[in-house]
Structure formats: C-alpha cells, structure tokens
Image: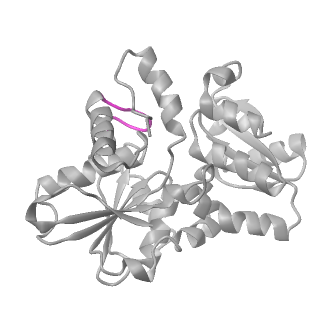
C-alpha cells in the first residue's frame, strides 16, 4: 500500500511511502520478503530447524523466531556478544525471540565474524544437528527473489525509489525490478562504502546510488536530532519510523529534497522496510542515557 506523505515540499516534489511494514504484524517489511522463498525451500527440503545470526536488537532474529512458531520450525539464533547472555530480560528483541521458542546461542564478536566460514558452520551442525541456514539479515539469492516483488506495475510513475540499506539484499531486489525511468537510492545504516560490491553481486543494473551521509555515526547510533525528526514525522503523517533504518533514510530523503537534490516535479517512492520492533529496545537505551524517547503512541 502506497501512502502519500501529506507534507508540502518545494519544487512540486511529491513523496509517497510503500507501507511494507503493514505486511505482517511480526514478520514485516523486508523480512517478510526475504523469508518467503527461504521458508519455502526449507519446507521443500523437509528441514525442521532454522538457524540464523543477528545482533542484540535484530529485526531479522525477531522475524525468524516468529516465522518459526507460525510455520512449525524449531529456530536457533546465534547472537553476537557473549555479554548478552544474562541480559535477555532487559532486551525486548531477545526476550520476544525466546518467548517465540527460539534457542539463543551467544558467541563472542570474534567467533561471530566466522559466520560465513565452512568450519564454523560445521561446528554448529555438530552441536545442533541438521538445520536450514539463513544468513545474517536474511540476504541470499532467495531473499533477493522475494525483494524483487516489492515494486509492482503500480509503482511505474515514480522517478526515484528510496530505501534503507543494511546487508544490501533489499535494495538489490528493488534494483532488479525497477522500471527504466527510475533511479534507486540506497541509504546505508552502517558507516563505510563496502556495500557497493555486495550489491553488485546480486544485480547487473547500474541505475542506482548509495547515499552515505545519513548513518548518524554508524549502525545503531542515533542523535537527538534524529529522534526529534522521527517524532515530528509521525505527528505530521501518522507514519511511524524506526531509528535504525527507515528513520535515517527518510531524514536523508527530506534533507535532499530541501537541498534541491531532486529535479523539479520528481515523484519519490520511499520503501518502509519495517523494523518497528526495534523502537522498544532503542527507547530503553535512550532512557538510560537520559535522551528524548521515540513516541510510540498511536
């Protein structure tokens, strides 16, 4: 569902948001898309267990955990950070995953970096038995296939498609399905320019660009300015944004509009990739730091 943003922008520029966050109450946005064909393959291979990776407030971990109970899989989450072992009750994402029946295995950051290594995967199979492996963030070729279904024929009239970027899977699917008149803009939530090659592994199209100026200090980092923007945007439009991905991306789009980045009369479509479950955990961190909270009132 595309929702027009009822804010007047300069140069006759219009903004609409594709509400992928409304696809499912717990497996929302790009996680729904990424898991669709992976779960179908796990079923076709008669796998009973899903194993995946994620950090403390991972949208992916929460989505896989819920998809597991919804579709009858045992789930295992390999979590980055041994120090989180006794902090599950303080962490809304991990608590939710555990309540969904996910078995949480906490590993050091050094071990976690081995998540793609065959010998590490082998050690996990020795410990847990057979499983269907879903990569961190869910990004693989089947995830790209699911994300290629985000854009439809109804979106043809938009000139620019904007989305947040984590592991690069969602934007790759969008790039693969964009129309000839469109340019895709990605807004990385992480510092650095290493995602270019990751994305090129999944797409041959060149009509896209990464905008690296709106990560607010890096993954999971926020500022009072960003929180204020998220709260004001929701107050004006009724659309909630998460602080890790969509909030930063929408901030960037609006800032670029005001800086005349987009040609006059541009029609911009923003992809809301979900991630709203992360707000609760972020508010815990903000409260501890005595910073403004993200408004969660309906």
Q: Residue at x 33, y 40 (%)?
A: 230
Rendering quarter of residue 11: bottom left
Q: Is residue 125 left or right of residue 118?
A: right
Check the image and report above or below for 112 versus 171: above
Rendering quarter of residue 219: top left
Q: Nearer the viewer, residue 234 or 129?
A: 234
Extent of the magenta region: 216-223
Q: Nearer the viewer, residue 217 or 43?
A: 43
Q: Is residue 294 left or right of residue 92?
A: left
Check the image and report above or below for 216 versus 132: above
Q: Residue at x 32, y 74 (%)?
A: 207
Horizontal and vertical percent for residue 183? 30, 72
Horizontal and vertical percent for residue 264? 11, 70
Is residue 155 inside the magenta stretch? no
In this rendering, does residue 13 appear at all? yes
Q: Residue at x 52, y 38 (%)?
A: 278
Which quarter of the rendered picture does the N terminus lie within?
Answer: bottom left
Horizontal and vertical percent for residue 14? 21, 66
Horizontal and vertical percent for residue 86? 70, 18
Q: Nearer the viewer, residue 268 or 141?
A: 268
């Amino acid at each position: 569902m595309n929702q027009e943003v009822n804010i007047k922008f300069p140069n006759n520029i219009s903004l609409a948001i594709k509400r992928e966050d409304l696809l499912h109450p717990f497996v929302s946005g790009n996680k729904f898309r990424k898991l669709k064909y992976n779960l179908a393959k796990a079923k076709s291979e008669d796998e009973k267990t899903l194993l995946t990776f994620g950090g403390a407030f991972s949208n992916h971990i929460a989505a896989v955990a819920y998809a597991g109970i919804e579709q009858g899989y045992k789930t295992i989450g390999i979590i980055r950070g041994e120090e989180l072992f006794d902090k599950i009750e303080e962490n809304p994402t991990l608590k939710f995953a555990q309540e969904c029946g996910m078995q949480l295995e906490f590993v050091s950051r050094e071990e976690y970096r081995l998540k793609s290594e065959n010998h590490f995967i082998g050690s996990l199979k020795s410990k847990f038995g057979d499983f269907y492996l879903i990569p961190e963030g869910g990004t693989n070729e089947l995830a790209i296939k699911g994300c290629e279904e985000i854009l439809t024929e109804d979106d043809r009239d938009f000139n620019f498609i904007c989305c947040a970027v984590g592991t690069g899977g969602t934007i790759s699917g969008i790039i693969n399905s964009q129309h000839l008149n469109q340019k895709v803009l990605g807004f990385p939530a992480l510092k650095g320019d290493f995602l270019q090659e990751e994305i090129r592994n999944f797409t041959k199209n060149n009509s896209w660009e990464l905008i690296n100026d709106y990560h607010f200090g890096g993954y999971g980092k926020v500022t009072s300015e960003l929180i204020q923007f998220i709260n004001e945007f929701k107050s004006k439009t009724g659309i909630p944004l998460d602080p890790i991905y969509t909030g930063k991306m929408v901030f960037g789009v609006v800032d670029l509009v005001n800086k005349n980045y987009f040609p006059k009369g541009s029609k911009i479509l923003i992809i809301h990739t979900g991630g709203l479950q992360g707000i609760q955990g972020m508010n815990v961190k903000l409260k501890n730091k005595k910073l403004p909270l993200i408004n969660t009132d309906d």
